Image: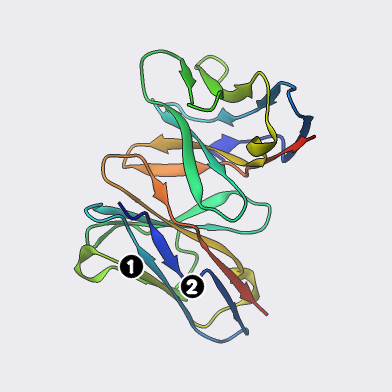
Amino acid sequence: AQSVTQLDSQVPVFEEAPVELRCNYSSSVSVYLFWYVQYPNQGLQLLLKYLSGSTLVESINGFEAEFNKSQTSFHLRKPSVHISDTAEYFCAVRKTGNQFYFGTGTSLTVIP
Amino acid sequence: EAGVTQFPSHSVIEKGQTVTLRCDPISGHDNLYWYRRVMGKEIKFLLHFVKESKQDESGMPNNRFLAERTGGTYSTLKVQPAELEDSGVYFCASSLTGQLYFGPGTRLTVT
């Protein structure tokens, strides 16, 4: 069964506009949630993570994600995107045994 | 500190041939993972090493895939014989305490 669902495969957005990339997970146990980003011609990099505590987590470049247990979601948001945010974004869940499950990815294209 | 490195970056082989992918994790990282992404699909888990031992190889698609991690340092993933459906990007990742650090991936094309 799919553990992570990213409904949007491609998201085009104009520069300085807000964006939301959706992620839903399926799990009956506690999970740790992550967003990874892959810039063109690079490997995946950790963007932000939720392990415990505050349900709102932030990255250093203005992205934030909120863990919503009741909706089993971990959507990624940014109030104003830059051209440099163009990349592919992957939502991931880590379950017991250090096993990670990834979504299909969302390709974000920022249009000048 | 050097990151996770993978070699080669690209490989194009014919169906039936053999290919070996290599991953050098971050020094000191006991956990090493192999993942694969087929075009447009999710990044799928292949297997997980803890030091030189296979902790979980439930994601290996079939016995044409063989992974090793001799000495608990670098790892190799051999595909023999390669089939068309093996094409994709193979990612290696390492971790010490749970956060994954990815390599740039090897793009494998089987023709």
Q: Residue at x 56, y 23 (%)?
A: A62
Residue B58 drawn at (x, y percent)? 41, 57
Q: Which residue is mark 2?
A: B8
* Viewer-nearest residue: B55 or A36: A36
Quadrant into which the C terminus of chain B falls = bottom right
- What amino acid is labelled 2 in the image? Pro
Residue A106 drawn at (x, y percent)? 66, 40
**Label 1: few (<14), some or many (≥20) within 10 Å?**
many
Rendered position, A16 above or below B78: above
- Which SS class for mark 1? strand
Rendered position, A24 above or below A66: below
Left or right of A61 in this view: B58 = left
Q: Residue at x 44, y 56 (%)?
A: B103
Q: Which mark is residue B75?
A: 1
**Label 2: few (<14), some or many (≥20) within 10 Å?**
some
Q: Residue at x 50, y 84 (%)?
A: B18
Q: Earlier in the sequence, mark 1 or mark 2?
A: 2
**For residue A80, what is the image quadrant?**
top right
Left or right of A77 in this view: A28 = left
Left or right of B1 in this view: B86 = right
